Amino acid sequence: MHIFSLLSPIPDRYTTALVCHRWRHLACHPRHWLRVERSIKCASRPGVFPDLKTAISAARPGDTILISAGGSHLASDIQIKKPLCLVGGGALPEDTILTCSRGSDSAIEFLSTCKVANLTVRAELGCCFLHRSGRLTVEGCVLQCEENPLDFLSFPIVSTAAPAAARARGADRVTVAETRIEGGAKAVLSCGTLTLQHVRAIYAPKAIFFWFEAVEK
């Protein structure tokens, strides 16, 4: 297990995971994940950080960050410029909450391929996720724009992705699956070249779950 922890997530640990089932189990073991814990005692352990911004700064490309359940974690204008996976540590997305402070543009700004799963993200007068470039996957989350007289200025997801000569066509994309979206003017605002496609919604007794993609025109 210790040897696997010394490997870089991409490409070394990813490559070893393809060897056999046993190596895949070891390479993907949760002990290799970084963790965000608000407890002072937990934060003193290796690989454990007191807040999300610190964990993202310390992460290597390909790392998974497990955010502890219970209470609310501050997330305001945090930039991610490397491939990462953010996962809520609770049984339900409501168990792990990221709160974007009022006046911030977004909770998290993505400039690389990333995945976010099992989290609740709350924002006011801003957006939950600001997608600049890369492939963003949002799965099993709750995105909430809190009620405000200026609610028409809020959007759960905003994409400003634009074509670049250095990136291949299709390199920028937003994929949303089994996610509750509440509040805001509309679910996603595209200020770049992405258009909304493959929209599907399931109406549950107390919520609406969305599936959709935003891809290049």
Image (tube, rainbow, N blue to C red):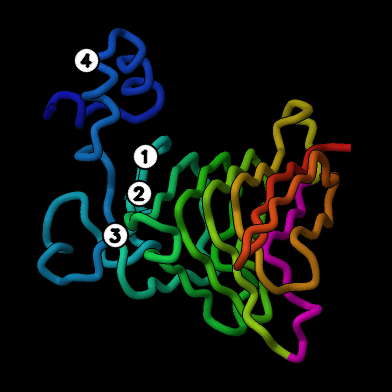
| Outermost residue, top side | 19
> Could you tell me the amino acid type at mark 3?
Val
Q: Is residue 151 magenta?
A: yes
Q: Which residues are magenta?
A: 149-161
Labels 3 and 2 touching (C-beta < 8 A): yes
Nearest the eye: 50 or 148: 148
Q: Residues within 10 Å of mark 2 (few under 14, many from 20)?
A: many
Relative to 174, 34 lies left or right: left
**Mark 2 residue element:** strand
Q: Which residue is mark 2?
A: 65
Labels 3 and 1 touching (C-beta < 8 A): no
Nearest the eye: 106 or 140: 140
> Could you tell me the amino acid type at mark 2?
Ile
Residue 112 spot, x, y in % from top left? 58, 42
Q: Quadrant of residue 26?
A: top left
Q: Which residue is mark 3?
A: 36
Labels 4 and 3 touching (C-beta < 8 A): no
Q: Residue drawn at (62%, 64%), measured in percent from left and top?
A: 205
Q: Which residue is mark 4?
A: 22
Q: Which callout, 1 or 4, points at the residue further toward the start of the chain? A: 4
Q: Residue drawn at (75%, 30%), measured in percent from left and top?
A: 170
| Outermost residue, bottom side | 149
Q: Residues within 10 Å of mark 1 (few under 14, many from 20)?
A: many
Labels 2 and 1 touching (C-beta < 8 A): yes
**Mark 3 residue element:** strand
Mark drawn on residue 63: 1
> Could you tell me the amino acid type at mark 4?
Arg
Quarter that holds the N terminus = top left
